[in-house]
Amino acid sequence: MRSSLGVTSSVHSGSAAGRPGPASAGAVLLAELTKIRTVRSTIWTLLPTFVVSVGLSLLVGFSFARSSEQQRGGDLPLFAAFFGLTLGQLALVVFGVLVLGSEYSSGTIRATLVAVPQRGLVYLGKVLATGLLALAVAVPTVLVSFFTAQAALGRYGVSLGSAGAPAAVVGACLHLTLLCLFALGVTAMLRGSVRSLAVLLPVFFLGAQGLGNIPKVRTVTQFLPDQTSWVIMHLAGPQDDARWARDYGPWTGVGLLVLWTAASLLGGYLVLRRRDA
Amino acid sequence: MAIGDFRGLFRPPPFPSVTGVIDVRNISKRYGSTVAVDGLSFTVRPGQVTGFLGPNGAGKSTTIRMMLGLDRPSAGEVLIDGRSYRSQVSPLRRVGALLEARSVHGGRSAYHHLLWLAQSNRIPRARVREVLTLVGLEGVSKRRVGGFSLGMVQRLGVAAALLGDPPVLLFDEPVNGLDPEGIRWIRDLMRGLAAEGRTVLVSSHLMSEMALTADHLVVIGRGRLLADSGVQEFVAEHSGSHVRIRTPEPERMRDVLTAAGLRVRTAEDGALEAYGAEAARIGELASAHRLTVHEVSAQGASLEEAFMRLTGDAVQYRAEGGR
């Protein structure tokens, strides 16, 4: 019988030898972050989130500053701050799709699963890496949008400490991050970029924002994932007005998005765990 | 403590057994009603190149994907060093694989592709440079893989396989897309890796390629094991080299040869074909029994023909055996 020691010493001569590394979420997270930052096309989708959101805040802020004061009362400064996110979020959704979808289209998913065959672990790494990057984009986007809108509003602008503003800022950051992760979960379920975008973009463009203006349809569309955090961001209209009032409060709305995201990520995990790659 | 430090959970045994043995245990893979792999069992041992041979569609890639945990077997299991791939800790340090299907993002540089692989298995960053030099890609390591030729992508795949300096290596159709120089390079590499005591499994649909590279052959057809033997034994057993005999007394000649323990069949033109002995021995037998012969000639068959015959039989067998 061949001595296993002999084989070990002859095989493990290169510098790759060393301490046997434990399966570690830290290592997987680092690898996933490297993957994201080393594909330019993916990382570039993060920029429009910031540019579009801040740009629209500026425009809406200016336009509100020049129009009469009566409309929307106290919601106006926050509406101006966060309206741009409804468009800027689409880039973040695309990012959430591409992070995983490009692995399927390029075949990298096979290398990924060979390197980390524990599918729960690799998925956790992917979710954490995507979530961290989304949050890293969401926080400056939301803050800069807020201050840009307030500056544009001039004397109508409010401070970060004013009523509802802190909750709105936190809610907006969560909204962007969770929506990105929701898109990631959908992509894990559908296993491809094109399919996922074909499902997500119509929902986020038409379903919610377009059809949402029709009152009857809104009883349903108000529960769509991109809609539920509109209350906390003061985008849903005055909630004391029956025409605009939603069936849930601001934090419940954020909670609903958390549920959407959890369901999507769980569905993605179940598909990744079961399917052949 | 680092996030997800699972040291306590996944502690490897104090002296992990690096046997390098791949143990394929009765695996099957069905896709709906199609059977890609059908009750396959074999063992791949270290210190030699094992050729994994079969016609296209025989189930080679599916088997290798099951070895790597990419596909889940419908039945059976594959153990490497006594454990399934999915339970390997830092698998790139135990098993290196070059897959047939492309698995690199075209927008990423060669260096970055290897970097994230290394990070995922805690392989030192310096090793990335080492393997890039080893496969001759150090000059283009910052270029995006999308602009690489097929041969360069293949070399990058080899670099990824060698990244963890693993004792077990799987190469799925590695010569695809390589020029003659590249083919010789990868052949020498595989032989060198085996000589270092590693386990090397290389799949191919080309018998001629395996004849030059492999020490041992595992031949499959239609997802079933057809042969599992050393290359020399395989040639002796399956090459179909025989002695052709023309004689006016074929019945007596047949009896004599059969009595001598040879396999005999009658060719279409009435000549006899004897398997298992040299022409000289046939001549001696004929003369000892005072048989007239008009022709005694050795008929060779190439390894390629042997392979075709073997896998062709498998197809026939399947066609008759199927419903």
Image (cartoon, rainbow, N blue to C red):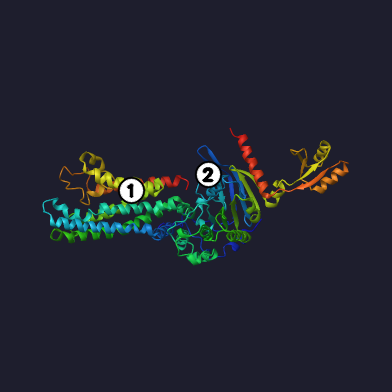
Q: Amino acid at mark 2?
A: Pro
Q: Nearer the viewer, residue B128 or A164?
A: B128
Tell me the tag on residue B177.
none
Quarter residue B259 falls in: top right
Q: Is residue B27 left or right of residue A41?
A: right
Which residue is located at x 59 percent, y 51 percent? Answer: B204
Which residue is located at x 22 percent, y 38 percent? Answer: A216
Judging by the rendered image, the residue that carries numbered circle 2 is: B73
The answer to whether residue A77 shows anywhere in this view is yes
Q: Position of residue B296 (x, y in %)?
A: 81, 45
Q: Nearer the viewer, residue B293 or B288?
A: B293
Q: Secondary structure at mark 1?
A: helix
Q: Is residue A75 left or right of residue A1?
A: left
Mark 2 → mark 1, Cα distance in angstroms: 32 Å
Q: Position of residue B299 (x, y in %)?
A: 75, 47
The answer to whether residue A121 shows anywhere in this view is no
Location of the C terminus of chain B (image quadrant): top right
Q: Looking at the picture, do discs 2 and 1 lie on one chain? A: no
Q: Nearer the viewer, residue B269 or B288?
A: B269
Q: Position of residue B317 (x, y in %)?
A: 63, 37
- Dot 1 falls on which chain? A
Judging by the rendered image, the residue that carries numbered circle 1 is: A261
Q: Amino acid at mark 1?
A: Thr
Q: Position of residue A96 (x, y in %)?
A: 35, 52
Q: Residues within 10 Å of mark 2 (few under 14, many from 20)?
A: many
Quarter residue A108 falls in: bottom left
Which residue is located at x 13 percent, y 51 percent? Answer: A73
